[in-house]
Amino acid sequence: MEAIPDKMAAVLLTGNGGFACLSYRTDVAVPKPGVGEVLIRVGAAGINNTDINTRTAWYSKDVLTATEAGSGDGFAKAKTEDSGWTGAVPQFPRIQGADACGRIVAVGEGVDRVRIGERVLVEPVFRGASRFEATYFGSEVDGGFAQYARVPTAHAHSIHSPLSDVELASFPCA
């Protein structure tokens, strides 16, 4: 079993806006898996429209049309308070990265330890108790733009493929 550090590198989203709202840090606490969760050492993470839309506040109900003005100032009417994927208030800082591939390095209570070492793809839409409850990996919960990510075990799908982690990280949302 590999040693899991206390701190990791991650890209943090510090608010809505342009690239200036992204901050690379090397002092972020490694998450601990909770009940029914696994900890993944991220091998690769892809960027998709959810990452960009969350950063720019594009999901805000006041953004009615796309604009060519760009992510830094193209959504002047966007409101942070309703700009999360689910319409909830985003919590900053947030680790984005909706698409990820990696290996399980630890498991939380209720998860079989046999999963440690599995190569997995993360299904980014985390379903709740009903089909109407969901959160999005990298939007409402921390995602894959870090060395480690915590996900529900049901959303960490075992993958056996000759494709690289980089190639596989392009699949989940797409």
Image (cartoon, rainbow, N blue to C red):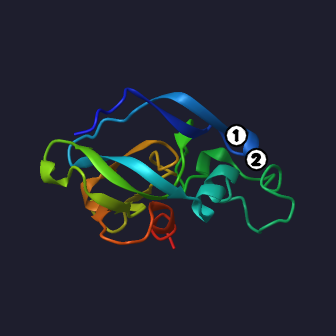
Whether residue 37 sits left or right of residue 45 in the image: it is left
Q: Which element carries disc 2, helix, strand or loop?
A: loop
Q: Please name whichever residue, 131 or 13, is drawn nearer the observer in this view of the structure.
A: 13
Provide residue 92's location: percent of width, then percent of height: 56, 37
Residue found at x 39% / y 33% = 30
Q: Please name whichever residue, 22 or 160, is drawn nearer the observer in this view of the structure.
A: 160
Q: Which mark is residue 18?
A: 2
Which quarter shows the N terminus?
top left
Q: Which element carries disc 1, helix, strand or loop?
A: helix
Provide residue 104's location: percent of width, then percent of height: 29, 50
Q: Amino acid at mark 2?
A: Gly
Residue found at x 37% / y 66% = 132
Query: Can residue 5 be seen in the rendering of this structure?
Result: yes
Name the outermost residue toward the right: 69
Residue found at x 65% / y 36% = 23
Please give the residue where the numbered disc 1 appears in the rendered image.
21
Q: Which mark is residue 94?
A: none
Badge 1: few (under 14), some or many (20 or more) residues near its Cα, within 10 Å?
A: some
Residue 159 is drawn in which quadrant?
A: bottom left
Looking at the image, is 164 positioned above or below residue 144? below
Whether residue 43 sits left or right of residue 16 in the image: it is left
Residue 133 is drawn in which quadrant?
A: bottom left
Q: Please name whichever residue, 44 or 156, is drawn nearer the observer in this view of the structure.
A: 44
All told, the count of numbered labels is 2
Q: Are the residues flagged by discs 1 and 2 in contact, CB closer than 8 Å? A: yes
Q: Please name whichever residue, 48 or 56, is drawn nearer the observer in this view of the structure.
A: 48
Query: Can residue 112 be seen in the rendering of this structure?
Result: no
Looking at the image, is 11 positioned above or below residue 159? above
